[in-house]
């Protein structure tokens, strides 16, 4: 492989081909620090032409490659396996905002741009790029596209797929497909853009994208509501959608145990209620008319819900600082889980109308089979996406509990399937769920996926061992 790595150095420069153990660790270890793969090295191209040249070298030498953005994924999709035969293709140097068109409301970017960088660039242009998630300070737009990331604003703006108009992709053969067209309508054959979005780098390497921008809202208001059950939160969601329409941007469900963990491990954070409640909803309105209009809308919604007994209590943020404090409660749930210790994560979706029933039924199943396990249930209620996580019983051995992960996964995923849901809503399949999904997809569906993989990547060099 010395000839291969030497050729890579000729393409990207010696400083951008990393082979020393100390330099490789952060590229080989997953975000949760539970798995470390092996690789021939890490190659860091600076532009699309260099990506294409590296992919052609991989073809010539039959070297697999693992595309990587911010390496913030949770399903082992962006780290190599233990074979040590692959390279990690890091797009971390590809960070150009190529163009901004405020008339067409689009921005063209390199795939290695950090999500927060794109948000800030849009704001500087007087526009909004609405994709927002906890890892936005470190995840890249290429990774967001490769996994079709969701986030907190899906209810109004959709997943990353809905926020992308065009792509630039290096194929498995090292060719460059320039599909960077900022068009809302283009019916000229198969939609190749949608083929690569969500494919987790198994069909090609996304190197650039045309993203949708939106007008900046005149006002963004946040409220936290307390209630007694997930079913009540669904009724509240229906009322909010009816009263607020498209202004309803976020609608996040959090159980009491979630916020108990947050206040336990981050004592500077406090719940704004005199007592605790079984469930909470964090909702956000983004209004294009005025702050006064948004405030009247939100106060009217909360007042009606209180009068009907749909919610037990509520607080409306009266300042940006208060709004950030409420969102911090939500965003610190994963961090609090990590502080609490090892846990078993599930990123699932079920039809919105059945979320309450799903939680109730699956909680009972887990309690029967794994007594004392603690449920950390939160997520994007407005689009049916739950982070349905399981923590070990208090004072139990975390390592012994983690050994139960396959059995716990089967209980949760079987229940998800029974409710007509998906075992991956926004994190992807990666290597972690690749085999698991076979129990829930039909042979027809799996066969079509294999056909696409074989047709586009016959040498199986693009992120092998992931998805399919």
Image: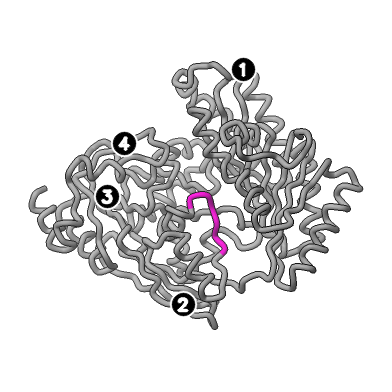
Query: Alpha-carbon distance for marks 1 and 3?
Result: 41 Å
Question: What residue lies at 31% left-to-right and 36% top-to-bottom?
Answer: 36
Circle 3/circle 2 CB separation < 8 Å: no
Tell me which label, 2 or 4, sits earlier in the chain: 4
The residue indicated by pointer 4 is 36
Q: Mark 4 packing: few (<14 Cα in 10 Å), some, or many (20+)?
A: some
- Of tags 3 and 2, the one toward the viewer is 2
Magenta residue span: 130-135
Query: Alpha-carbon distance for marks 3 and 4?
Result: 13 Å
Question: What residue lies at 51% left-to-right and 54% top-to-bottom?
Answer: 149
Q: Mark 3 packing: few (<14 Cα in 10 Å), some, or many (20+)?
A: many
Tell me which label, 1 or 2, sits earlier in the chain: 2
Tell me which label, 3 or 2, sits earlier in the chain: 3
Q: Is residue 115 above or below residue 407?
A: below
- Of tags 2 and 4, the one toward the viewer is 2
Tell me which label, 4 or 1, sits earlier in the chain: 4
Query: Which labelled disc corresponds to residue 88?
Result: 3
């Amino acid at each position: 492989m010395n000839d291969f790595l030497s050729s890579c150095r000729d393409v990207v420069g010696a400083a951008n081909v990393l082979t020393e153990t100390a330099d490789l660790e952060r590229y080989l270890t997953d975000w949760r620090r539970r798995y470390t793969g092996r690789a021939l090295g890490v190659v860091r191209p600076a532009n699309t032409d260099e990506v294409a040249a590296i992919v052609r070298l991989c073809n010539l030498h039959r070297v697999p490659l693992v595309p990587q953005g911010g390496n913030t994924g949770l399903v082992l999709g962006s780290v190599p396996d233990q074979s040590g035969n692959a390279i990690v293709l890091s797009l971390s140097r590809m960070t150009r905002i190529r163009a901004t068109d405020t008339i067409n409301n689009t921005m063209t970017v390199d795939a290695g741009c950090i999500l927060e960088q794109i948000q800030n660039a849009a704001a500087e242009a007087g526009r909004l790029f609405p994709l927002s998630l906890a890892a936005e300070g470190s995840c890249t737009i290429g990774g967001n596209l490769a996994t079709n990331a969701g986030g907190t604003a899906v209810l109004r703006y959709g997943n990353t797929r809905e926020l992308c108009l065009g792509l630039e992709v290096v194929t498995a053969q090292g060719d460059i497909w320039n599909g960077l067209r900022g068009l809302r309508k283009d019916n000229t054959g198969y939609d190749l853009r949608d083929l690569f979005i969500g494919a987790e780098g198994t069909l090609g390497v996304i190197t650039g994208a045309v993203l949708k921008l939106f007008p900046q809202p005149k006002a963004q208001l946040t409220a936290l509501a307390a209630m007694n059950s997930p079913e009540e939160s669904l009724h509240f969601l229906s009322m909010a959608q009816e009263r607020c329409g498209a202004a309803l941007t976020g609608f996040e469900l959090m159980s009491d145990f979630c916020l108990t963990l947050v206040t336990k491990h981050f004592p500077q954070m406090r719940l704004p209620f005199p007592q605790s409640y079984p469930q909470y909803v964090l909702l956000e309105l983004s209004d294009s008319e005025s702050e006064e209009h948004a405030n009247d809308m939100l106060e009217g919604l909360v007042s009606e819900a209180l009068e009907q007994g749909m919610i037990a209590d509520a607080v409306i943020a009266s300042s940006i600082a208060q709004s950030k404090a409420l969102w911090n409660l939500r965003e610190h749930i994963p961090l609090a889980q990590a502080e609490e210790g090892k846990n078993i994560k599930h990123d699932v979706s079920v039809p919105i109308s059945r979320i309450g029933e799903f939680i109730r039924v699956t909680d009972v199943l887990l309690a029967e089979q794994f007594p004392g396990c603690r449920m950390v249930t939160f997520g994007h209620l407005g689009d049916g996406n739950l982070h349905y996580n399981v923590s070990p019983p208090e004072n139990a051995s975390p390592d012994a509990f983690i050994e139960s992960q396959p059995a716990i996964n089967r209980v949760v995923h079987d229940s998800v399937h029974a409710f007509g849901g998906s075992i991956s809503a926004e994190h992807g399949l990666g290597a972690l769920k690749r085999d698991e999904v076979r129990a829930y997809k039909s042979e027809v569906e799996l066969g079509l996926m294999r056909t696409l993989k074989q047709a586009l990547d016959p040498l199986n060099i693009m992120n092998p061992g992931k998805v399919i």
